[in-house]
Image (cartoon, coloured by chain):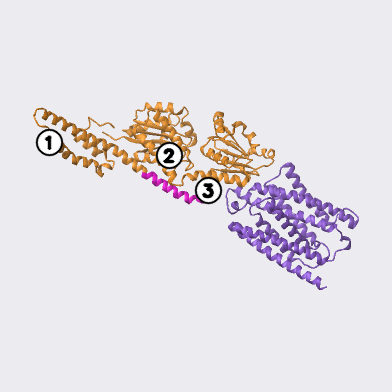
Chain colours: A orange, B purple
Amino acid sequence: MSKKHISLIGVNHKSTPLEVREKIALTGGYEEALNRLRNEQVLEFYLLSTCNRVELLWVAEDTVESTPKMQRFLFGEAVVPEQWDGYSYVYRDHEAVNHLFKVAASLDSLVVGEAQILGQIKEAYRYASQFGCTGPLLNKLLHKAFSVAKRIRSETGIGSAAVSISSAAVELARKIFGNLDDKKVLLIGAGEMAELAAEHLLGQGVKGITVANRTLSRAVDLAQRFNGSACSLEEITEQIETVDIIVSSTGSSELIIRSKDVRPLMKIRRNRPLFFIDIAVPRDLDPELNEIDNVFLYDIDDLSQVVEMNRSERDKEAVKAARIVEEETLKFSRWQEGLTITPTISALRAKADEICTSEVSKTLARMELSDSDRQKVEKLAQAITAKMLHNPLRFLKSESCRKGDDSKIDMVRTVFGLENDDADR
Amino acid sequence: MSQVTLIQEINYLLFLAVLAVTVLSCAVYLVFFLYQKNQMRKWARFLLIGSWLLQSGYIITRFISIGHTPITTYHEAVFFFAWATTTAYISFRWRYTVKNFGTFVSVLILGLLLGSAFASREVIPLEPALQSLWLPVHAGISLVAYGFFGLAFCGGLMYLLQERELKSRKLGYFFSRLPSLEALDQLNAHCLAVGFAFLTLGMVSGIFWSKQAWATYWRWNPKEVCSLIIWLIYLVQIHQRFTVGWRGRLAALMIVGGFTLVMITLWLVLN
């Protein structure tokens, strides 16, 4: 028998340029993709797709054979096969678990500590389990990932890193505008950080939020959430005449707002200041905007610099978080190993018991014995099997077997002939 | 005779007291700027109000000892300027609170007082032609206008410092210590408007005084030309701000530049 292996393949903002990620990202929703994955003949699987990453987690007995299949699924026609290895990362077993925990805890995010990724993983898992794609191993693993993320959020200050970026934006807005009560915000695109910043600004009592998005329906949804109004991308220039704070985070590879478009608007605005916050990568807003009088432009790096002061503090938190991830990964691996040893032990016991009871009943059927004698014979047989199993069981439970060395468990199974009647796993 | 010397004595002591209290106030304001302890600010304000009272006392005693409003010599004019700035600041403080504004203003006031300290305190008898009620009205109103422009100058300076930090995106020393750009801009607009109103009144009263003293409204002497230029400079700023919507950095630069020009012409004319 061979052990089940957990593997993970994925692309993220570090490994793959945005143009490629855009082509790979799911367009048809999870249902269609999960159905296609079903044909790949792996035991369990789960798929995550966000604007910054696409990751595929699967369980198979043979990782060597299944990996290229998964790569093909991931990249499809979008990327030539020669580039597959360069763009994607593949992790196995311990490393895969470790990576998943890191992603869930937002340690691998573009903005470390943002909370939305956990919700996205939960949603992806909900689809996978709904369509019966996950099994006992992935169910356990993902639930573990949720609790690890929760633990890191409560035990470290990593979550405040993302929050501090949007509060830096608010602090800057306050230094520019003073009172935010009569200020209007324009949200372009619907990135996670932008929404966080918008929420923060709303919390500071800004007057209204307008949401602009490529797909108007998404803009309307978001606007409803923020109690604001929606507009299309074409109306942005018009909006800049009246709004004061602009938060942009579209996935566009081109500039959304150019300096030469804003310059003439300043006269219409009677030079009221404008505060641009560019959270998109690559940038949405023309860096030259900052050259215009009364216009202030901050991108994500600038905002990070603003929170630089408590950087060392955050590094400490990251170390703490990494330690928790490592600790939980070990715990999970141990559980997974136990999963293979425990069935072997119970299969061994079951087999011995079965032999014992069948032989005893065969013998007793041919003998006339009193009840007390009958019990004595049964006890004798049980004692012999127990004594016989004592050492093999101790061997299985020993540390040397726990170290993930499957060959020893395999040997025990072969010696006792457990291969055919493999216990339910 | 001894009463006159007594008053002069008191007058001189008051001047020394003004200097001492203002230096102290300014120092406490600077310490407050460094450490941002609210207790400090309270003390600094107390001292500044004390300084204002002493300054008023100095002007009154000098008025008694020389027999007319002490506003004609360089020393007197600059001292009155300092008093007007202090008055403007204290009155202003009732309406707005602008973070750390006091520090900048107290430095300006101290600078003006030192300027008056280095000038001769000698009393120059006034030409009989100038002896009129128009003298205190005209000079007083004009100097109050300059006081407000002095506040605007401080606000403009603070605006430029804060704006530079925000634009460079490297937030440093001033970012947390200075108020928002909006607050500073409003302060500038307010001081500019009030100052300009006083300046215009000062101009008009000057014209009437000239008519009374020299029998003509306008003589094109250097002092009058300079006053006209200053008035035009502020007129342009007011116009640009309230009709075209000039604000922010350019407006702050104009305010700082305008005030510097005022100071230079004042110095030239009075010398």
Q: Mark 2 vs mark 1: which is more N-terminal?
A: 2
Say which chain tag 1 marks.
A
Q: Give the residue at mark 2.
A: A104
Q: In which quarter of the image is residue B124?
A: bottom right
Farthest right residue?
A: B215
Name the residue tied to disc 3. Answer: A307
The amino acid type found where label 2 is placed reads Ala
Mark 2 or mark 1, whichever is nearer to me:
1
Classify mark 1: helix, strand or loop: helix
Q: Are discs 1 and 3 less than 8 Å apart at CB?
A: no
Count of marks overlaid on the render? 3
> On the image, numbered disc 1 is attached to which residue?
A376
Residue A275 is situated, as x and y percent measured from the top left of the image, at 61, 42
In the picture, the quarter occupied by the N terminus of chain A is top left
| Type of amino acid at the residue the image marks with label 1 | Lys
Question: Residue B1 at x, y = what percent?
Answer: 83, 73
Q: Please indicate whether residue A223 sits to the left or right of residue B219 in the image.
A: left
Instruction: Give the dominant element type of the magenta stretch: helix, strand or loop.
Output: helix
Mark 2 or 3, nearer chain start? 2
Q: What subunit carries mark 2?
A: A
* Residue at (71% x, 42% y) in the render: B245
Say whether residue A318 is magenta.
Answer: yes
Residue A14 highlighted magenta (yes or no): no
Instruction: Using the image, determine if residue A166 lies above or below residue B260.
Output: above
Q: Of helix, strand and loop, which one carries label 3? A: helix
Q: Is residue A147 visible?
A: yes
Residue at 24 percent of width and 43 percent of height: A398
The crowding category of the residue bearing disc 3, from other C-alpha atoms within 10 Å (few below 14, some 14 to 19, many at least 20), is: some
Q: Name the subunit of mark 3.
A: A
Asked whether B164 or A425 is in front, the reply is A425
Q: Magenta span covers which residues?
A: A307-327
Residue type indicated by callout 3:
Val
